[in-house]
Image: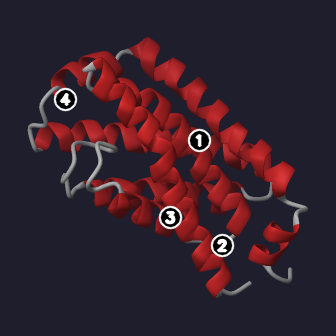
Amino acid sequence: MKWNTTKLIAVGGLGAVTVVLSLFGAAINAISGISGLGGILNIFVFSMMAALCCLLIDKFGSATLMGLIFSICAIPVPVLGPPGFLPKILIGIAFGSSADMIYMLLKRNKKIAAIAIGIISAYVTLFLILWLGSLFSIPGIHESKETFLTLPVIFGGGIYAAFSGYVGYLVYTKLKDTAVVKRIRGKE
C-alpha cells in the first residue's frame, strides 16, 4: 500500500480531532487550576487516537505524521504544555514515532499492538512533558513531577493507558468494515 491523498487527509483529520478532544482536558486544567489534572483525560485521548491511527491507516509513519499535525495545532492551546510552548512539536513527533514502532513490531496481533501502543505512547508523552517542562521551567511542573512520578501512579497509569489503547482497538473494529475506512485503506 502506498501513501495517497486520502490517507494523508485521514491522518491530518485524526490529528485535528485529537486536538479537539484534548481541549476537554485543557478546560479541566483551566477550571480546576491544577496543572496536569486535564492531562489524565488527555493521556487517554492521545493513546486511543495513536492506536486508532496505526490500525486505521496501517502504514509506517502515520502516527508520527498525526503526532506532528496534532502538536503543531496544539501550539496555541494549553495541551502538551502551556500555549506557545514550541517543544510540543518534539513531544508530538516522539509520541507518534513510538506508536509507529510498536505497531510495526506487533501488527500481527492488532489487539496486543493497540494495547502496547496505548502504554508506550502514554509513557513517552508523560516523560517528555515532565522532562521538557523541567528543562524550560514551566510553572507547576515540579508539583506535576511529584504527583505523576510515583509508583502507584506509574503502575495505574500503565493500566489506564492500556485500556485507552484497547478502546482505540474497539473503535477500529466497529469502523473497519465501513465504506469510509475501506476507502481510506484502499485496495489491500
Q: Mark 3 against mark 2, which lies toward the viewer?
A: 3
Which circle marks residue 140 in the picture?
none
Residue in the image at 39% along x and 61% along y: 93
Which circle marks residue 59 in the picture?
2
Q: Position of residue 108 (x, y in %)?
A: 80, 58
Q: Furthest-top residue in view? A: 152
Label 2 is placed on what type of residue? Lys
Q: If you read the primary sequence from the N terminus, does the residue marked by circle 3 or circle 1 appear first? A: 3
Q: Where is residue 157 in the image (x, y as percent from the top left)?
A: 50, 24
**Residue identifier under label 3:** 66
Q: Quadrant of the N terminus?
A: bottom right
Q: Mark 2 against mark 4, which lies toward the viewer?
A: 4
**Residue identifier under label 1:** 118
Q: Position of residue 106 (x, y in %)?
A: 70, 54
**Residue identifier under label 4:** 141
Label 3 is placed on what type of residue? Met
In the picture provided, is 112 more to the left or to the right than 144?
right
Label 4 is placed on what type of residue? Ile
Q: If you read the primary sequence from the N terminus, does the residue marked by circle 3 or circle 2 appear first? A: 2
Determine the CA span between mark 3 and mark 1.
15 Å
SS class, disc 1: helix
